[in-house]
Image: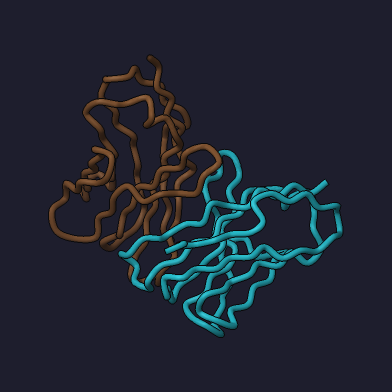
Amino acid sequence: NAGVTQTPKFQVLKTGQSMTLQCAQDMNHEYMSWYRQDPGMGLRLIHYSVGAGITDQGEVPNGYNVSRSTTEDFPLRLLSAAPSQTSVYFCASSLGRSQDGYTFGSGTRLTVV
Amino acid sequence: AQSVTQPDIHITVSEGASLELRCNYSYGATPYLFWYVQSPGQGLQLLLKYFSGDTLVQGIKGFEAEFKRSQSSFNLRKPSVHWSDAAEYFCAVGAMEYGNKLVFGAGTILRVKS
């Protein structure tokens, strides 16, 4: 049971490049979300999905796109990378009830130069 | 809207000493409360959670937390800290009214000195 798998673990991008951060879970979780973690700011919600075909914006969605074509996968796309997007990105999933808590991936450390 | 405050950015304790990490939340109804731990370079691991019932909850690794509605607090405690507890700790709050979304505090970095 792999849980939540994120790839890549590290990435360096040049300003203006695009890329996709991958997230996959094998727990049949309905709810998936993307957070970014910046020093002193905790985790901020970028986008989330309550099931296949359903996505919504979180607190800091600008510059990011998501889609949810399957229950297992929830990729995060950076359309045109900016230095302000340098961060650690975490994907999380849960069964779908508020009290369940999340299972987190190990993160992707992204640097935009 | 929900919000979470962790007043201490850094805390240093001696190995074997007791620990209390503070968490205050802002939410009108009954919240769901969580503590997560993040070791360097790792993802977040759930330590414990509260959503109803006994206000003192036990978690993994010998941690416990107490929900105090009157103080809007959910402080994390451990009677005797081990060097391996050095990590960053995050408090988070959710609520049924907000679906599955969790709001996280800014985190507290725990250092353990020998």
Q: Residue at x 54, y 82 (%)?
A: A54
Q: Residue furthest bottom?
A: A53
Q: Residue furthest left?
A: B54
What is the letter of the brown chain?
B
Q: Quadrant of residue A17?
A: bottom right
Residue A49, placed above or below residue B90? below
Q: Residue at x 49, y 62 (%)?
A: A4
Residue B103 location (% of width, % of height) = 45, 56
Q: Residue at x 28, y 44 (%)?
A: B73
Residue B14 location (% of width, % of height) = 34, 17
Quadrant holding the N terminus of chain A = bottom left
User: For the image shown, how many numbered marks are present on the structure?
Assistant: 0
**In the shown orientation, is residue B43 left or right of residue B66?**
right
What is the letter of the cyan chain?
A
**In the shown orientation, is residue A107 left or right of residue A82?**
left
Residue B110 location (% of width, % of height) = 42, 29
**In the shown orientation, is residue A57 left or right of residue A93?**
right
Residue B49, placed above or below residue A50? above
Please state which of residues A69 and B105 is positioned toward the viewer in this rendering: A69
Q: Residue at x 51, y 56 (%)?
A: A105
**In the shown orientation, is residue B54 left or right of residue B40?**
left
Residue A62, placed above or below residue B3? below
Please state which of residues A17 and A106 is positioned toward the viewer in this rendering: A106
Q: Quadrant of residue A74?
A: bottom right
Q: Residue furthest front?
A: A1
Give the colour scheme of this rendering. Answer: by chain
Residue A96 location (% of width, % of height) = 38, 73
Please state which of residues B6 and A100 is positioned toward the viewer in this rendering: A100
